[in-house]
Image (cartoon, grey):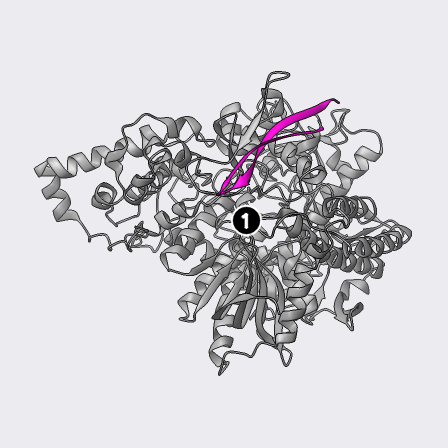
């Protein structure tokens, strides 16, 4: 039997980005013994990279804004595939969560009368994003980090949890390893909160860091939980495309929120040609109206540069394919000709710095070259909207690893608010659950042994496959075959290639010791990425329509029947099983908020105003 | 393109040495790209920390040709053709393996700083702060905790014995951020003097020079803190005024690592 250390906690939170930190703070405040376990050093999680802001209907800039408009924007942005209750809770609670950060020391940019300033972003009817220049994620994670430290929460840094343990179908703990020492570690726990983020490292061009290997998605599947909407991946329209080594690094949507426009190689503002019927009634169709909208939202419609991300990413993809792209295969994002250098440097300091340092481009003088980059997965662990509990008792999920909130496409700014709203809820309900569990669950030695043996096996194959090489092939396959535009034959080929890569991944060998060995870490993460990639490819093959982040060349239109279903993924007897299941139905009283799902003209704006007026 | 050559320090607490590697070069590469390519092609167990690869998370600090820098923001074309390039772990913290060091010193110091404690809200239930009042604290909030300022600070770089009584520039920035926060009521000046060793700093500005976020650590954080302490300690009128206005003493900090 392998040696390992053991820790006992009421609640173990896996992941220390915004959702994990907020969950741990809440569980700790509920008085239960809480551990926060993270793969990196504290404060380095992916949340730190979020740029543009936190969406919350504070109404500081546009008093017309309220939760109903935010709810509507979120549902329409997700093409109505969202879990309506999650979208409602999110819109209702986001303002309180933002103001709470201020109580903990966060300093957002201010309006002239001293309140939190809000900026425009794609798909949001009003300027809604609380922000700090273009480094909002840093402010948020540091505020939460400092607050968690002051609360004395036990933090286990550079510790990777790799398998969940269960007793009679309910969570009993988690098992993993210390990255620094390579020693194995068992957490016995009454409840576990997954806050592990996304899956982007399975794609070649991504804005995601090494941590984004789908750990929570994989662990949840293995523990018997349901995943939903795994075909819904978000390509952020504006990643850097040049130089090659920085390809994929994020360029904030705030550039467009603050006045930047997309142009092709013919200097055309091409987004006007890509306004879909679904958003036609609320989108400006002339450059003049679009430009007026920044200052006057009452009498003008939103610029198509700020259509939801799925629309913009597809448009860029189409422009490049039509031969109107930039020299390096992107398009141009121009703020230099539209705003003063002082304004650009004040509003977008880290974009200025990033382009200057990494690409020798001065964004106050020249346009940026940008193109789509895999940024986010809307799909994830199926949870109860109110409690964030998965289909496995005692297992909770919040943030990117949870599914449902964003439907088929997430609006920018809705992620940071999602982390806060559902991080808090997951921590709260995990603590309440743990209080109801009468004793520490028993840990099944066979489960621990199986996990330990699997984790150490690569050391017995010192001359096996190279983990880095297999990983590179996986990212190529996902990029080529499960990208922005998908089709049956390519998805089937992807599934075949993933299967063959799995056979190779199971033969990966590791050189060196267990002490801080990235080759070993990747060998294990690779198996998780393959599982998640298979879930994405199979879900994409199952959904025979185009909606949000999922576009099928062979089924180019949305299908109303598919619009009522989630694709659910489960692991049963070792295999992934996929089942379309009905969405929770939208209550009649909320339906008028959303507007019609048809291109019939002016409807999209009016129902909201009418519903608000009744209050 | 031609190969790029780089000497990377390999070893652990018991010792180590530079190992030279050659990998194919790409346009626009940064030092971290080369390290990753070395991992993939030659040394899969080469230990290195990184996350965002865009200068936003502060994970990939190292000493490049002896200068503390972020590997992700150091372009390969900043070196002369044929120039020898060495990459070694930051010097001030104990080596774990290769380029990874034990930075727990910093996280322990963070625990000794008393929490933010806001004053009551406005009568209308809001928090009103003006951009000009928050801007100088926002400068401090830019800190990405790369700990390069800690690495370069001569008070602890070659003096392990000072670590117990010195928090380092990163935490002076944090103290300044709290001290100058428009809403905060906690008082940490005596703690900064007595426990965090602000007096050790003789303002050589090494920390300011290495800061990848261009925070004016010395001028905007350390010197104002020193001035406030001097005013507090030696100006009896200011002392008496503050004494009367004070809403409460700082909660005692938990005991440090010593």
Q: Chain of mark 1?
A: A
Which secondary structure dominates the residues rendered in magenta?
Answer: strand
| Residue that sits furthest to the front in the current view | B14
Residue A337, can we see it?
no
Task: Give how far across and how far down residue B23 sits, in percent.
Answer: 70, 30
Q: Is residue B213 left or right of residue A86?
A: left
Could you tell me which secondary element the residue under label 1 belongs to?
Answer: helix
Where on the picture, by quarter, is residue B38?
A: top right
Q: Is residue A315 left or right of residue A109?
A: right
Q: Would residue B17 be counted in the magenta stretch?
A: yes
In the image, is residue A204 above or below residue A176?
above
Residue at 65% from the left image edge and 37% from the top image edge: B36
Residue underneath mark 1: A47
Within 10 Å of the Cα at label 1, are there few (<14), some (14-19), or many (20+) other Cα atoms?
many
Residue at 48% from the left image edge and 75% from the top image edge: A432
| Residue that sits furthest to the bottom in the current view | A438
Q: Is residue A341 left or right of residue A267?
A: left
In the image, is residue B31 above or below residue A567?
above
In the image, is residue A502 above or below residue B198?
below
Q: Would residue B171 be counted in the magenta stretch?
A: no
Bounds of the magenta span? B1-23
Task: Give how far across and how far down residue A272 sits, in percent.
Answer: 74, 36
* Residue nearest the observer in this picture, A295 or A53: A53
Task: Give how far across and how far down residue B91 sits, in percent.
Answer: 44, 35
In the image, is residue B165 above or below residue B4?
below
Residue A374, can we see it?
yes
Where on the picture, by quarter, is residue A529?
A: bottom right
């Amino acid at each position: 039997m392998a040696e390992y250390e053991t820790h006992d906690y009421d609640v173990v939170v896996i992941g220390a980005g915004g959702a994990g930190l907020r969950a741990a703070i809440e569980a700790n405040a509920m008085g239960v013994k809480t551990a926060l376990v993270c793969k990196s050093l504290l404060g380095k999680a992916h949340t730190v990279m979020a740029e543009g802001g936190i969406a919350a209907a504070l109404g500081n800039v546009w008093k017309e804004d309220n939760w109903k408009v935010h709810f509507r924007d979120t549902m329409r942005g997700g093409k109505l595939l969202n879990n309506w209750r999650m979208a409602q809770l999110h819109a209702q609670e986001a303002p309180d969560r933002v103001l709470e950060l201020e109580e903990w020391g966060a300093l957002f940019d201010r309006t002239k009368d001293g309140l939190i300033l809000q900026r425009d972003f794609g798909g949001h009817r009003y300027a809604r994003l609380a922000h700090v220049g273009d480094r909002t994620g840093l402010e948020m994670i540091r505020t939460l980090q400092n607050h968690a430290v002051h609360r004395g929460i036990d933090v286990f840094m550079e510790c990777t949890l790799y398998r969940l343990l269960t007793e009679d179908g309910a969570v009993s703990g988690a098992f993993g390893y210390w990255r620094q020492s390579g020693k194995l570690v068992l957490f016995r726990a009454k409840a576990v909160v997954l806050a592990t983020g996304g899956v982007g490292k399975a794609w070649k061009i991504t804005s995601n860091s090494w941590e984004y290997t789908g750990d929570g998605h994989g662990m949840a599947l293995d523990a018997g939980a349901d995943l939903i909407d795994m075909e819904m991946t978000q390509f952020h329209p504006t990643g850097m495309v040049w130089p090659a080594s920085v390809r994929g690094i994020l360029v904030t949507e705030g550039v467009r929120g603050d006045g930047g426009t997309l142009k092709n190689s013919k200097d055309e503002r091409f987004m006007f040609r890509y306004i879909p019927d679904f958003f036609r009634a609320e989108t400006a169709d002339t450059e003049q109206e679009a430009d007026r909208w920044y200052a006057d939202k009452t009498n003008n419609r939103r610029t198509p540069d700020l259509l939801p991300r799925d629309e913009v990413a597809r448009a860029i993809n189409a422009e490049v394919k039509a031969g109107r792209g930039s020299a390096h295969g992107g398009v141009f994002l121009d703020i230099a000709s539209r705003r003063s250098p002082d304004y650009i440097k004040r509003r977008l300091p880290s974009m200025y710095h990033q382009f200057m340092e990494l690409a020798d481009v001065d964004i106050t003088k020249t346009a940026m070259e940008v193109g789509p980059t895999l940024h986010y997965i809307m799909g994830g662990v199926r949870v109860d909207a109110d409690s964030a509990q998965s289909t496995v008792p005692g297992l909770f999920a919040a943030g990117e690893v949870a599914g449902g909130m964003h439907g088929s496409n997430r609006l920018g700014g809705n992620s940071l608010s999602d982390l806060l709203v559902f991080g808090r809820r997951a921590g709260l309900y995990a603590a309440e659950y743990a209080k109801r569990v009468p004793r520490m669950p028993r840990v099944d030695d066979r489960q621990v042994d199986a996990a330990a043996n699997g984790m150490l096996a690569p050391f017995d194959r010192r001359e096996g496959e190279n983990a880095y090489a297999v990983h590179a092939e996986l990212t190529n396959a996902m990029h080529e075959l499960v990208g922005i535009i998908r089709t049956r034959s390519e998805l089937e080929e992807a599934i075949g290639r993933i299967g063959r890569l799995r056979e190779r991944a199971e033969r990966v060998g590791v050189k060196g010791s267990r002490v801080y060995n990235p080759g070993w870490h990747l060998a294990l993460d690779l198996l998780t990425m393959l599982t998640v990639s298979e879930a994405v490819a199979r879900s994409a093959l199952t959904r025979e329509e185009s909606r949000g982040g999922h576009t099928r060349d062979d089924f180019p239109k949305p299908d109303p029947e598919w619009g009522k279903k989630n694709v659910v993924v489960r692991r049963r007897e070792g295999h992934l099983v996929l089942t379309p299941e009905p969405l929770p139905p939208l209550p009649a009283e909320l339906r008028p908020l959303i507007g019609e799902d048809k291109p019939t003209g002016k409807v999209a704006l009016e129902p909201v105003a009418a519903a608000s007026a009744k209050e | 393109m031609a190969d790029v050559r780089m000497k990377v320090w390999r070893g652990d607490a018991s010792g180590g040495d530079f190992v030279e590697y050659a990998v194919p070069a790409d346009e626009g590469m940064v030092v971290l790209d080369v390290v990753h390519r070395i991992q993939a092609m030659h040394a899969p167990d080469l230990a290195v920390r990184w996350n965002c690869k865009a200068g936003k998370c502060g994970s990939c600090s190292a000493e490049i040709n002896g200068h503390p820098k972020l590997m992700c923001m150091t372009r390969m074309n900043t070196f002369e053709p044929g120039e020898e390039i060495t990459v070694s772990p930051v010097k001030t913290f104990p080596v774990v393996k290769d380029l990874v060091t034990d930075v727990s010193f910093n996280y322990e110091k963070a625990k000794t700083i008393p929490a933010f404690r806001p004053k009551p809200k406005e009568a209308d239930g809001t928090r009103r702060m003006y951009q000009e009042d928050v801007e100088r604290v926002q400068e401090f909030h830019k800190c990405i905790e790369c700990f390069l300022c800690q690495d370069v600070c001569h008070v602890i770089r070659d003096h392990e014995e000072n670590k117990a009584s010195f928090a380092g520039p990163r935490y002076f920035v944090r103290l300044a951020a709290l001290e100058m926060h428009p809403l905060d009521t906690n008082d940490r000046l005596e703690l900064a003097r007595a426990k965090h060793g602000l007096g050790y700093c003789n303002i050589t500005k090494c920390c300011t020079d290495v800061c990848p976020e261009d925070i004016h650590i010395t001028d905007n954080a350390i010197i104002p803190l020193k001035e406030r302490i001097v005013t507090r300690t030696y100006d009896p009128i200011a002392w008496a005024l503050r004494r009367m206005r004070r809403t409460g003493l700082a909660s005692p900090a938990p005991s440090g690592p010593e």
